[in-house]
Image (cartoon, coloured by chain):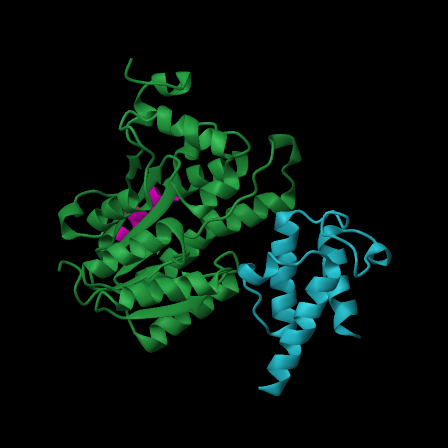
Amino acid sequence: MSLEGKLALVTGSGRGIGRAIALKLASQGADIIVDFFRHRESAEQTAKDIQALGVKAEVVRANVGDAAKIDELFDMIGSKFGHLDILINNAASGVGRPLAEIDVKAWEWTMDINVRACLLCAQRAAKLMEGRNGKIVSISSLGSRFVLPNYTVVGVSKAALEALTRYLAIELAPLGICVNAIAASAVETEALKFYFKEGLAKDSRQATPAGRMVSPEDVAKVVAFLCSEDAFMIRGQTIIIDGGTSVGVLAFAGKVGQ
Amino acid sequence: MSIEEQVKDILARITRVDKAIITRESTFKEIKADSLDVVQALVAVEETFGIEIPDEDAQKFQNFGDFVSYVESRVAQTEKV
């Protein structure tokens, strides 16, 4: 197993994409710190499922939108483990509103969780990754470059996250740390149900050349690759996982393959 | 100050409504609390009282009274421990 003996922190790993990533890294031998904010039951279930794979799991509650909580999280990791090999910036939130209704509170909430947290976590993680060939992978979304309904704040936050990924990749390279991101189209998760009504999910399936929506496991496989030494020369990139949706205008016509 | 008054203060501060309009029967919608307001209120209440309110529980709150009763019972549990 390629990640045996490694320690990974996956923020927001109780559910959805974060859970799938945590399980994938665990299946390759990594011990996992399962961070959650609002859903303890889901996080504890994820930890149980990780332990069933024969590796260690530690459940920690931290709202990464709160800088003090990030400090507490990394203080704990530092004192309990003394190191970290992999950081997955997955935790995300957002306020789905038309542009005209975005207020300062919605903007700051989204930016603090989706971008600032990734910077602060990377800063603290880098210190724990010294001499360990650390990996940092952040989870973006196609909303960073394409306009989705009521997605302005999240889309802008993801664009900033992708820019941050490039800067981190260069500045952390001398420390031996590989930094990348992935951007997926709509992934079948609980969060998606919250953001989009069923109608849009159906449209998305029809508009995906690969013939189905992206699953959390699809994302987890790419993230695991980016955490492997095979991806050593990939730096500062955002890998798109969308079944081909974004490469053709056909997607916007709502159907493909005819 | 009672737990109810403290929770009311937090909710009124976050939603910027006059706390006088908040009663135990008020729904979050009536208090003009959107989903972000509710999460921020939950976090503020958690920090004030040193408790944890998972979303699984919070989703069951029908009105302000349910919220307060939940906080009261969780605080009582904490004090017993």
Percent x, y for residue A224? 23, 50
- Residue occupying image coordinates x 81% and y 57%: B22
Percent x, y for residue A8? 29, 62
Position of A124 with respect to B11 (left or right) is left
Query: What colour denotes chain B?
Result: cyan
Verify whether residue B67 appears in magenta: no
- The N terminus of chain A is located in which quarter? bottom left
Percent x, y for residue A61? 46, 66
Q: Which residues are magenta?
A: A163-172
The answer to whether residue A224 of the structure is visible from this angle is yes
Viewer-proximal residue, B68 or A69? Answer: B68
Position of B4 with respect to A95 (left or right) is right
Q: Farthest residue in the top direction?
A: A258
- Residue occupying image coordinates x 40% and y 19%: A254
**Vertical order, A176 against A78 (above or below):** above
Percent x, y for residue A178? 24, 50
Query: What colour denotes chain A?
Result: green
Viewer-proximal residue, A143 or B60? Answer: B60
Location of residue A183 by image quarter: top left
Q: Farthest residue in the bottom direction?
A: B80
The answer to whether residue A32 of the structure is visible from this angle is no
Verify whether residue A168 appears in magenta: yes
Q: Farthest residue in the right direction?
A: B20
